[in-house]
Image (tube, rainbow, N blue to C red):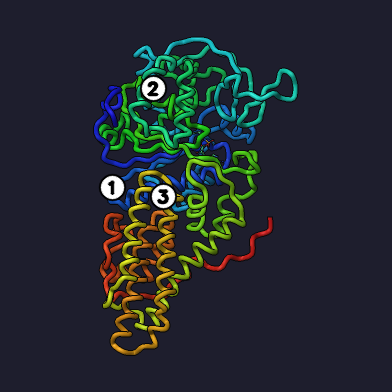
Amino acid sequence: MAATADHSTTGASAPAYYVSTPIYYVNDRPHLGHAYTTVAGDVLTRWHRQRGEKVWYLTGTDEHGQKIMRTAEANGVSPQEWCDKLVEEAWKPLWEHLEIANDDFIRTTQQRHTDRVQEFVQDLYDKGEIYKGGYSGPYCVGCEEFKLPAELLDGATADEKLCSVHKKPVEWLEEENYFFRLSAYGPKLLEFYAANPDFIQPATARNEVLRFVEQDLKDLSISRSTFNWGVPLPWDEKHVLYVWVDALQNYITAAGYGSDPERFAELWPASVHLVGKDILRFHAVIWPAMLMAAGLPLPKRVVANGWLMVGGEKMSKSNLTGIAPTDLTSHFGVDAYRYYFLRAIPFGTDGSFSWEDFTARYTSELANDFGNLASRVAAMVGKYFDGVLPASASDGEAEQAVKDGLAKAVETADRKIGEELDFAGGLAAIFEFVKQVNGYITEQEPWKVAKDDSEEGRARLATILYTAAESLRATAVLLNPVMPSTAEKLWTSLGAEAAGLGALSAQTVATVADWGRLPAGATVTKGEILFPRLEEKPAA
Ligand code: MSP
């Protein structure tokens, strides 16, 4: 990080690669949109783990505020009971089902969070960053946010205004509140963005934030006194903290802020905050300003993903497709699900889901290109070499082209997935390689070479099958972060671990292109079909 702003350099170095998702509101069950961000973060962190880096992946739930309180009331239970139920019955089970390997799960009602939050705001209060004032304005409970005039639409009557995101009436809120001096941070934020051009990504998101901050920032109302479902302000317990100010701090409270300095020094600043583009300002404006006020280093990157859309609108709880993540995983399988959204939608842009598109990609890319390659190669090693992988004996130009193709795929995928968060581009590079290997087999025609019993013929056949199997070894490693169960099946079918290569999880990106890692003599078995033929689409 560049060193123009003092807050950007005050932190200890952070050797761990720390990625966070937004913490999700638990007023309802998770939908495809939430799963999209969480899977992306999982793939990113698994990729970095596979680079051999120390990684920390955080997700969790946002449990305070009016939205949750009202939902609980409507369901006749206390907010805490509501949150406990939803977290245990809906959110955690879905992440487990989708094989999300998060290292921690923070809930904002946990004491490890609320205690630290109180300390944090008390510190800002003591420093004079927070003052008491009055505010009135239109408020959207769906967004949990005061709205600006430009963010409102006309409603059914002359007085009614609608939130442009939720298309629901806003409420007029008039309160005596505490305020954070956000307005003082405009110039410092602009200076920081200029010194750290990669802080906000993609460029469209960065531009939007710059335009917003270049106008005058207003101070931020950070407390509420008309309801009590929140973290009480330590110096005035009639007020609870505004849910967003509480929520943003999860990124530091979970990382050991104020409780475990050593861990905090290792984890903070976060490497990447993944956010939906709807919550970009909170992460790229308010959160950095709060951290500056507290004298803490800023996260290295805030990366905004686009929206999954339904009928031209952001998929939300009120306009769902009617399709839950588990409806898709029971049809396509968990790994294909993890793959599909990242492959089909360039990260950062909006995208729609369709059964037809998912089915087409499943069939052509996963089942035909990749799954068939794996089963054909295993079948041929079985048929021609009794399932014992032969040593390559006569590498030539064709084999060199495959090796070069692998090196290129690894370099591209590592850069695109690991650095640029261009999952679609990284996956395209890996599948380009899979296609190349298919083409190699088609050209080499091992089934014809197999008819030649001479020593030369056998050597040629051995080379072709070794080249194909070794390519699959590398493919298993490259796809492991995206499709961990499938990659594991392939690893087993290649007999890689038993042949001495170690567990799939022990393979690294740095060595994946080293040709010849899969030892000759490995026992190759046909194993399970990686991507079985799809059943009929379930009736809507
Ligand atoms: N609780 C806040 C976040 C606090 S973070 C300190 C919140 N929660 S949310 O549950 O409403 O949404 C969180 C995130 O879910 C979105 O920003 C986005 O990352 C993801 N998505 C929700 N709907 C989505 C789509 N339709 N498409 C893609 N992502 C979506 O805001």
Q: In this view, does 179 lie above or below 515?
A: above
Q: Residue at x 39, y 88 (%)?
A: 451
Q: Which type of secondary structure does the marked residue at label 2 adopt? A: helix
Distance, label 3 to label 2, CA atoms, is: 30 Å
Where is residue 511 drawn, in percent x and y? 27, 58
> Relative to 371, is 153 on the left or the right?
right
Q: Which amino acid lies under the numbered mark 1 shown in the image of this protein?
A: Glu
- Examine the rendered structure and indicate whether residue 112 appears above or below residue 390: above
- Quarter the N terminus occupies: top left
Taking the image as shown, residue 306 lies to the left or right of residue 407, namely right
Side of 385 where 306 appears, left or right: right
Q: Please name the residue that numbered disc 3 is placed on.
A: 43
Relative to 458, residue 485 above or below: above
Q: Where is residue 299 in the image (x, y as percent from the top left)?
A: 35, 32
Label 1 near ligand 1 (CB < 8 Å): no
Is residue 85 in sight in this rendering? Answer: no
* Residue 196 visible in rendering: yes
Secondary structure at numbered mark 1: loop
Q: Residue 189 carries which label?
A: 2
Question: Residue at (52%, 19%) from the top-left corner?
Answer: 224
Q: Where is residue 257 in the image (x, y as percent from the top left)?
A: 32, 30
Say whether disc 1 or disc 2 marks the residue closer to the N-terminus: 1
Q: Nearer the viewer, mark 1 or mark 2?
A: 2
Q: Front-most of 327 and 340?
A: 340
User: Which label's residue is closer to the chain start, 3 or 2?
Assistant: 3
Residue 452 picture quarter: bottom left
